[in-house]
Image (cartoon, grey):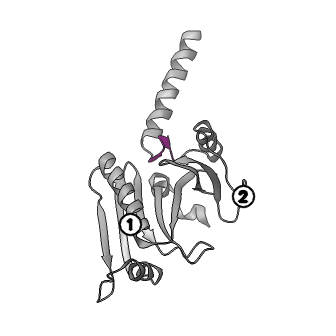
Amino acid sequence: MKKYILLLSLLLSIVVNAQNDNHIKFMGIPLGQQLHSFIFKLKQKGFEDGANGSLSKSLKQYEMRGRFLGVSNQDIIIQYYDDKTVVGVFTSYNYKSWDEALKQYNYIKTMLTKKYGKPKKCEEKFLSNAIPKDDKGKFQAVKSDKCRYLSKYGVDSGYIEVKISNGANYLNASLIDVVLTYWDESDIKKRNPLDDL
């Protein structure tokens, strides 16, 4: 009897690990699992509850803070469904100049390219007739949505994207952001639209 229980738990462990391998990973932790389990694994890597330190039920987000890409106390936002299944993680780096933002964007893009190969989508351009020549002009182009810098990597069951953003979602309007997003689409493809009603 003990042999059967041991064999059954071994098979169950293999099935769970195989399911997790189909999900995109953030710091080696698969998305697509329950929020409490994902948070627990991040805490094992040194992360702590973020500034809010609690669930935000209306936004379906959980904020944490820890060391990420060499930056200590970096805020990350975990996104999840009503059933607490983790679907995405994003973080942003805020800058007062175009040159600083571009340097961070290129650093992250280089690291992602080393790990995942060439991006499946890459746009790096200004959307105005005259391309700005100096840092201030390029910064203003980002703030006025006249700049599109993004690299998107198709990995596992989702994507990873790094982009330079105007920072419109943040309180300090004098900054631009480099946003890094991990998004898992495996559960989205399985979800029935009727479940959302």
Q: Specify the amino acid type for callout 2.
A: Asn
* Cα separation between marks 2 and 1: 29 Å
Image position, residue 53 (x, y; %):
72, 53
Is residue 140 found left or right of 53 in the rendered image? Answer: left
Is 172 magenta? The answer is no
Report the residue at 67% width, 53% height from top.
Answer: 50
Image position, residue 61 (x, y; %):
63, 59
The answer to whether 35 is drawn above or below residue 166 in the figure is above
Residue position for label 2: 52
- Magenta segment, which residues? 24-32
Is residue 136 found left or right of 195 in the rendered image? Answer: left
Report the residue at 45% width, 57% height from top.
Answer: 189
Mark 2 crowdedness (10 Å alpha carbons): few <14, some 14-19, many ≥20? few
Q: Quadrant of the N terminus?
A: top right
- Return the residue found at the far bottom: 129
**Secondary structure at numbered mark 1:** helix
Residue position for label 1: 102
